[in-house]
Amino acid sequence: MKTRSIRNFSIIAHIDHGKSTLADRLLELTGAIDPRKACDQVLDSLSLERERGITIKAKSVTLHYHHCDRDYVLNLIDTPGHVDFSYEVSKSLQACEGVLLLVDAAQGVEAQTVANAYLADEAGLTILPVLNKIDLAMARPDEVEAEIEHSLALEREAVLRVSAKTGQGVPAVLEAIVARIPPPGGDPAAPLRALVFDSVFNDYRGVVLHVRIVDGRLGPGERVRLMASGREYDVDEVGHFRPELRKARGLETGEVGYVIAAIRDLKDVRVGDTLTTARDAGRVAALPGYRPPLHTVFCGFYPDVATDYTALREALDRLALSDPSFSYLPESSDALGFGFRCGFLGLLHLEIVKERLERDHDLALVQTLPNVSYEIVPAAGAPYRIDAPGKMPDANLIREIREPVVLVSLIVGADQVGGIMRLCIERRGSFVSQEYISTTRVRLQFRMPLSEIIHDFYDRLKSITRGYGTMDYQFAGFAAADLVRLRILVARSEIDALSLVVHRSQAEYRGRKILQKLRKEIPRHLFEVALQAAVGGKIIARETISALSKDVTAKCYGGDVTRKRKLLEKQKEGKRRMRAVGGVEIPQKAFLAALRTDEEN
Amino acid sequence: MDSREMTGLYVHLPFCPRRCGYCDFAVVVGREPEAEAYAEALSAEVGWLARTTGRPRLESLYFGGGTPTRTPAAVLRVLAAVRAAFAVADDAEVTVEANPESATEETLDRLRAAGVNRLSLGVQSFDDGCLRRLGRSHDAAAAGAAVQRARERFPEVSVDLMFGVPGTSAKSWRRDLERAVALGPDHVSTYCLTVEEHTPLARAIRRGEAPPSEDALEAAHMALAAAFLPACGYARYEISNYARPGRASRHNLRYWRNQSCLGAGVAAAAFWAGTRWTNTADFDAYLARAAGRPAALFPPGPAADFHEHLPPRAALGESILVGLRLLEGVDLGALSARHGVSAEETFGAAIRAEIEQGLLERRGDRIALTARGLRFANRVLMAFALPGEGVRQSPRAS
């Protein structure tokens, strides 16, 4: 296959704008799947992705397309659609020459549309704007074209109009891919350089590398080296995604495919690494690295039952292979026992990892309140970062605390600007810019502490904008802030898992909220239980759980014996799962309730 | 002297004029026309029970409900069937539960004539406001008169009272106790109003239409009864029960001592040869099945929906956790011998921990709840539940 017949592209879109449906139509039109057998959304193979309607892991498929008497190979590299996964998007984009920028003709340009378009532009890719869902009664294609022109600086004339659902306009998309996206460059005669843009663990095959051949060629039997890790392997098999793995004799310059090389040690595979042959390793330069994942959100994961610790560790090891973008380190808590402190790309990423652990690995987890990392400037010594509130030193040892700040972009209705302004300012945001992308829709930018965003910001945005507002954010450095460590005490013992870092102005409010939740969920004891929130040595909020006066069943006759015994068994079982802190038994759900971000207000 | 095994028999009569808001018993409303058919089914089940158990001698017979006095003919019909099927001891305790409004002179006379010797009256309160809130149809005067009528006819009369009812006070509860004692019953049961799931009361509390229960008030009222009744000659012998000397309920003692007891009727429970079973709570299903043959070997009986047979450790735990409801407590040596498991090995550490907490006390080979333990009995009894060691319940397909 000649390089000039290859097109490597991705589809980028805001969530729910129809990316997976368009991918399915492309697969059908090129015969990669049989439409009669196709189960919807072939590329969203993980159940979690299908349920949430989002693509989490980048996956690829090779399409064979015949047009104007020529055969083309189109490599579609699927990308995740959520703000948290801009890292994964960037990985996929590195392997492409062009992108389809998909925009819902009814919803219009959204915050992630803009963010993704910027990423593609920065990567120097050709952008084909595609307007989807033009069959909908609510579609407003002319207005949305205007939005694309305004906010993304793309030519109106370049916009393709399709309905991925009905297939209308999709053949023109294939033609445009061939006509407008350039073929890959690269030197077939040069030593091998292949970009590892994804890796998947397969129970039978071990690690499957997803690669884009930049220079040279790669076939089975070759001894290869991963340049960053320095490890060498013998290639067992290479091939294409059709979308199942189809073995090939070799992968040529510009092609996208997979490599199996009996790689078992997960830690040796670094996504973004360059694959070359062992004999050329000394002579070639590694490809420019990917942006390393930026862990912005952290939390602790603890097994519900202490004995599951090993199972949790193994599950994390496995998950880390298919998702190298989260980190985990052992930690221990007085209240929760042994667990792991994990770092994520964002809050959704956290939820997805948690659900995968619970669902795919059948683990019951306790999750601590998500937090951001903080930069501590000590009274003496060099600044350092902490990723857990419990690691915050005493106030008198700190000169300054800095927190991560992000630049938030929001696209909302013009009539919702006031509400969003209030929300952002209430969350310590500072206004940056306001821009009308059409007569009715506005793009707002704020600088905000990241911690304010991971704490139910998205839900508030959705409720203020009746579900239509969208957001995206990018990291904008660390900034000093008046932050304190809020400690929660039960019967005068600190619950380390519940302590958090908050802005001084919010300490009392947040503390009170947590105590109220604990008061509802901690059962009464035979003695009075004091719940306190403290900053430093100062108690700023207090609640009391009064002592129980009696706990006795009135009647127990013949018919009640079994029921009573079973009830006691159940209670005893429940008691075993409680954590005892300072003589107080705290049920799991009390932690969970206190850890849950505020659902009210 | 008859050497056959002694046991008890409970017979359930589910008919009620209406369902009280707090009640979660197996009752039926408006099915009185079928009382005769029900009595027929009961008689069949009673006959079957007697045959399969080898006609044990009954030392107690208890007609509960529902409202047995609402269908006196059914009670008499079944009583006759019981006498025909079992050997009823001459001195057997024969109890019938009654409501003040249906405890008419005529009904009481008929019951007494048939050999009933103990009447248990569901008075609940002598306070009209409290009775109204409980949704009872009788008033305080009717309750007093019914106790009088019962006392004139039966050698033993028991009165049920309820405390912890929202809107009551220590003063009104004390008045209830005084009124009850003044009427001179032999036995007084004091039940704390319990909010059972799926009852109208539970729903009303959830909707905020009724006040939630207050454990401090309940504890105070329980303490009041525990001080007042013994001072009047009624010794507390179980968490909720008080009796004059020698007048403890022999039937109920069988339950707390975890002794065998048969059961007939809708939702009736039985415990025989180590197996415990419960009949279907569905009136129609019971009518259809009671006269039939059991699906499996005995036990359980033909209308059983559930049965279990506990392994020794769990059975020992069960004996202790029901037995501790009695103020006399349990004899660990005797129970170890009965179940063939050492109580010391199984529960020794737990017992010592509860003693440490001041909730249990040891009296020779016996252990019993302390005064504080009686208030927090559930906490103590939990120590004798063995999660995972019981036999999984085996609901029988109907």
Image: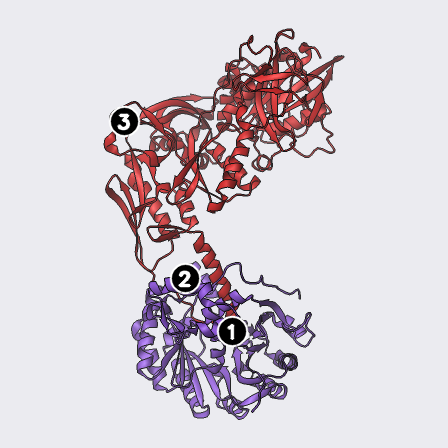
Letter of the chain shown red in the rendering: A
Q: Kindly check if marks 1 and 3 are in contact, taking CB atoms under 8 A apart as contact.
A: no
Mark 2–mark 3 CB contact (< 8 Å): no
Residue A218: where, in percent of width, then height?
A: 65, 15
Residue A541 shown left or right of residue A370 in the figure: left
Where in the figure is residue A65, as x and y percent of width and height? 72, 18
Q: Where does the image place residue B80, in percent across and percent down from the top left?
A: 60, 88
Q: Earlier in the sequence, mark 1 or mark 2?
A: 1
Q: Disc 1, disc 2: CB below 8 Å?
A: no
Spot the purple chain and give its letter. Answer: B
Cα separation between marks 1 and 3: 70 Å
Above or below A64: residue B185: below
Given the image, what chain letter belongs to the residue carrying mark 2? B
Instruction: Give the spatial CA distance, label 1 vs label 2.
Output: 21 Å
Camera-side mark, 1 or 3? 1
Same-chain check, marks 1 and 3: no
- Residues tagged by mark 2 and mark 3 found on one chain of the structure: no
Q: Chain of mark 1?
A: B
The N terminus of chain A lies in quadrant: top right
In the foreground, A166 or B293: B293
Seen as rendered, the residue at the extreme right is A69
Query: Is residue A77 visible to the viewer in this orientation of the structure?
Result: yes
* Residue underneath mark 3: A378
Circle on res. B338: 1
Q: Mark 1 packing: few (<14 Cα in 10 Å), some, or many (20+)?
A: some
SS at circle 1: helix
Seen from the viewer's position, the closer of residues A64 and A295 is A295
Residue B349 numbered mark, or none: 2
Type of amino acid at the residue the image marks with label 1: Arg
Q: Chain of mark 3?
A: A
